[in-house]
Amino acid sequence: MLTLFHTAASNVALFDALLKQLAPDIPARHVVDEAILREVRDAGAVTPAAIARVRAALAPLADPQSFVLCTCSSIGGLAEQAGERVMRVDRPMAERAVSLGRRIAIAATLQSTLAPTQALIQDIARQAGKPRETVALFIPSAWPLIERGDQAGYARAIADRLAEACARDRFDVIVLAQASMAVAEPLCAELPCPVLSSPRLGVEAAARAYRARLSDTSSSLAQSNLVES
């Protein structure tokens, strides 16, 4: 079972559509805990209470029969600490960004997402031996739109801010730090640098990891049966 752990209910439909397109063969379920995001958002960072809540929420999900994809970038690093069967959705995006250039813009509509995403990119860059500069593009006016269910307005607010930033500055790549921001990606096709979002890359990586683990398990069982026979 592939479990997708969300802190925003609005992401369920987005990831469900990607699963049906990219991994229809994989059994999947969605688990939502929006209280975590509310606490992190209000505090502007991951709090001890949020840490305890994430650990409690993930503990029963990351069992030997499951694989978990955490779709919240604000708690991605914490989620990964729950075990090797837990992935953060933005890691594949960050890896792609590091491979594309030196100057990386991080766009976010929640303040709490900027620091974790920057830390992830810098960590990947250090491991790869590729120094990278990150620039924060905070878009606080956009988040109230998605809370009201105005996805079109949310996407436009993000795209307009990125176009404005690109007109004043040069970037090799822009990452959309939150999964919810993927709706703006189609509106950014004319920008002078690539714009990356996490959902598709994250689901592709999770599907590969899930299938590889399933294949390893099947091989181990087959070898065990041969020995027993």
Image (spheres, rainbow, N blue to C red):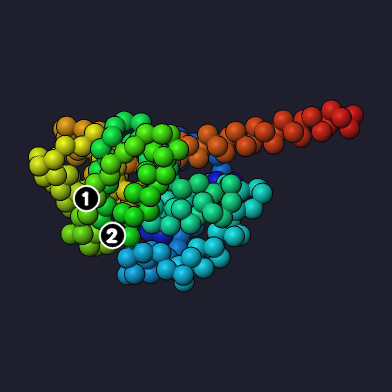
What's the CA distance linking mark 1 and mark 2?
A: 10 Å
Frontmost residue, 63 versus 14: 63
Q: Mark 1: which amino acid?
A: Leu
**Residue at 42% of width from left, 44% of height from top?**
123
Amino acid on which disc 2 is placed: Gln
Residue at 38% x, 53% y is 116
Which quarter of the figure has residue 47? Answer: bottom left
Instruction: List the residue tagged with mark 1.
Output: 137
Element under disc 1: strand
Is label 2 in a helix, a strand or a loop?
A: helix
Number of other residues with Cα within 10 Å of mark 1, as a class: few under 14, some 14 to 19, many 20 or more: many
Q: How crowded is mark 2: few (under 14 residues within 10 Å), some or many (20 or more)?
A: many
What residue do we see at 45% from left, 63% from top? 33
Which residue is identified by label 2?
111
Q: Position of residue 75 (x, y in %)?
A: 43, 57
Along the viewing direction, whichever of 159 and 152 lies nearer the viewer: 159
Number of numbered discs visible in the structure rendering: 2
x, y (%) of residue 148? Answer: 24, 62
| Residue 157, position as x, y percentages in the image | 16, 51
**Quarter of the figure with residue 97:** top left
